[in-house]
Amino acid sequence: MALSDAITTIRGVGDEQARKFKILGIETVADLIDYYPRRYEDFSVVTDIAKLRPGPVTIAAVVKQAKGHYVRRGMHITEAVVSDKTGSTRITWFNQPYREKSLKPGAEYFISGQYGLNYRRMSITNPSIELVQDFPANTARILAVYRETKGFNSASIRKIIREVLPEVRALPETLPKWIIEDQKLISRAEALEGIHFPKTTQQIEEARRRLGFEEVFALSLASLLNKDELNTEKSLKIPFKQDLAREFVANLPFDLTDSQREVVWRIYQDMERVHPMNRLVEGDVGSGKTVVAAMAALMVGQKKYQSAFMAPTELLARQHASTIHDLMDPLGLSNQVDLLVGSMSEAQKTLARAHIKDGSARFIVGTHALIGEKVDMHKLGLIIIDEQHRFGVDQRKILMSKAGHMPHVLSLTATPIPRSLALTLYGELDISILRDKPPGRSPIITKIVSPNSRASLYQKIDKEIAEGRQMFVVCPLISDSVIVEANSVEKVYEQMSKIDFKHRHVGLLHGKIKSTDKNKVMEDFINKKLDILVSTTVIEVGVDVPNASIMLIEGAERFGLAQLHQLRGRVGRGKEQGYCYLMMSDSSSPGPRLRALESSNDGFKLAELDLELRGPGAIYGTLQHGEIDLRVAKLSDSKLIASARGSAQEFIDKKENLRHYRELFEYVTKLRAVTNLN
Ligand code: ADP
Ligand code: MG
């Protein structure tokens, strides 16, 4: 059996089970081995029957007799009497009629389950049972508990993993020997067996330390290598022209915040250096990242080089183009702003391409497709990526070969990433944080709403609308299928436009709507022709409609904390008080995440809480669908992180050849492509 084989090659895994495994994201043997437990239940202590106490127990006993019968329609009971040398007790299974026939009288079994009162008699109910002579997977040990799916529980997962234990035991070592020794780590094979079938709690700890170490080590190595590579590139030096910066700032309708000043200044310093800039600017929604980016582009333009401003959606690209147009206008530079997006007419596109080619377009705005577009950006000096979409080493090389030098890179993100996580994930980046927000904004009022209170909420909202405000309504993605998603948002739209708000103008926006129509709807909303915009999360990032002061999020409990916070940032951008209503799907009580959102407006605080509640995968997941997740390492484990990062640095200082470690090489190469934000 090879690790890359489909799991159907494992004994006992048929097509039906393969289908269930697929739901859990498991398709190959390697995926299965990589499927780590979420927690453990300790059934390792074998108790004498005479000493049984209520609770989770394990006994080693012989089955005397087993009988099954129906107590009523649809309710079957199997009862057996089991005994060891100290006494006997009863075990009971509900609705598992096959049990009676499968038990071998006289054979010794491990039996693990809950011991307690059952129909006024003490018994072990619905236990797992396995012959003592087999390698027990589900009894008499510390049991791994996995993320399960309907009709497929941890016991079945454990049994199947047991089948591949020989493969696990034969897994090669991935880390250099000196690291294993210096760090006193157990081998990879031991760690993987230990994570699935631990013998002791100490073994779980050791397995976690080993696997967690490797995660952080590989990530750190990936970013250090990326950084090294970048530092061998010569960049285009962009001299800082103070007069130009002053003139730009003097023409702004507001004063820059201290944070904005500081970040701009850093960027100017970066771009004067010999090596290319690779900076990430983190700033909560509304912290004013666009101006910062525009000022970077301004300096690059002065050197007659181009900046490519890439937004995640066409909608945002259009909005950015008009913002940058307005910002450049007082300096007479607005004719150097060019938009290039798919929905433009061929004639417009041809014109934009011509401007880009002859260099008269200094501020090019588009989506991430700009990279792949057949545009000649030979004068490209700066890439600005809004809302943090990374592109890998390959794309960077394409750009380099076009430009003949490595452009500076500035990434902007509204997803606040706690520093500990940022350092581990993006070690190759310089990070700046826009801490303070532009003055004069009152915090958004956030309220959790149960569907029972929908009518009274609508009354309140309607009063705001009567006063000229506008509302966003965001519906959750309820399925991976675009069709179903469109359905749910359409239902909300129907209900609002035909019934609840039929006297208002209601618009609809979702992924299936044609791009040109989308722009029309968005324009109508911006121009106040619509009072209410019902949409999916397509409006999530960056959209700026200052008059929209109300955000209603349907099925709020389905969203992640970071995402909710980003959505909320769409309102409260103007002078009016902003409101965010978190509508629950039902009247169950809201969890700690929604409560946190209600009580805090601080994106960084919320991100740290999300990190605590759901682990780094959660935050990362909002960025890139969990391409990297630290599944074992805890970011709070600063000792582990420090030693893994230290070892990565040592690996580089020793000039170790990564290619000598095949598995590590492959893993790190993959990570280098995804950690590459630049
Ligand atoms: P984000 O960081 O979310 O991208 P934007 O750049 O879109 O934020 O800025 C949000 C709004 O704040 C814009 O309307 C912008 O003009 C305004 N703004 C930016 N900087 C300042 C400032 N220093 N003072 C006042 N308003 C500002
Ligand atoms: Mg923005």
Image (cartoon, rainbow, N blue to C red):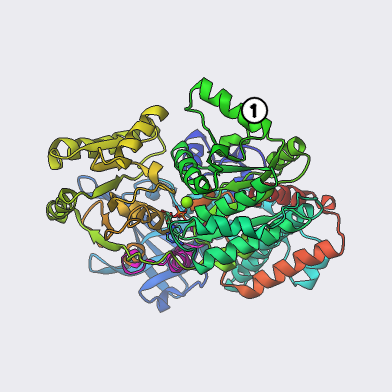
Where is residue 600 drawn, in percent x and y?
36, 68
Percent x, y of residue 224:
74, 59
Return the residue found at the far bottom.
51
615 horizontally vs 630: left or right: left
In the rendered image, is residue 2 in sight? no
Quadrant (top left/top right/bottom left/bottom right) for the N terminus: top right
Front residue of this view, candidates 134 and 400: 400
- Number of residue marks: 1
Q: Nearer the viewer, residue 507 or 117?
A: 507
Instruction: Say if 341 sits above or below 107 in the image.
Output: above
Residue 292 location (% of width, % of height): 55, 56
Q: Position of residue 281 (x, y in %)?
A: 57, 58
**Residue at the (15%, 35%) spot, across then down:** 498
Q: Is residue 494 left or right of residue 485?
A: left
| Tag 1 residue | 374
Where are the magenta residues, as a range? 596-619
What residue is rendered at 58% in x and 56% in y?
134
101 left or right, relative to 335? left
- The residue depicted at 56 percent of the width and 65 percent of the height is 261
Does the Cβ of the disc 1 residue fall within 8 Å of ligand 2?
no
The prevailing secondary structure element of the residues shown in magenta is helix
Q: Residue at x 53, y 67 (%)?
A: 259
Q: Secondary structure at mark 1?
A: loop
Quarter residue 424 falls in: bottom right
**Residue 476, placed above or below residue 356:** below
Amino acid type of the residue tagged 1 in the rendering: Lys
Figure quadrant of residue 239: bottom right
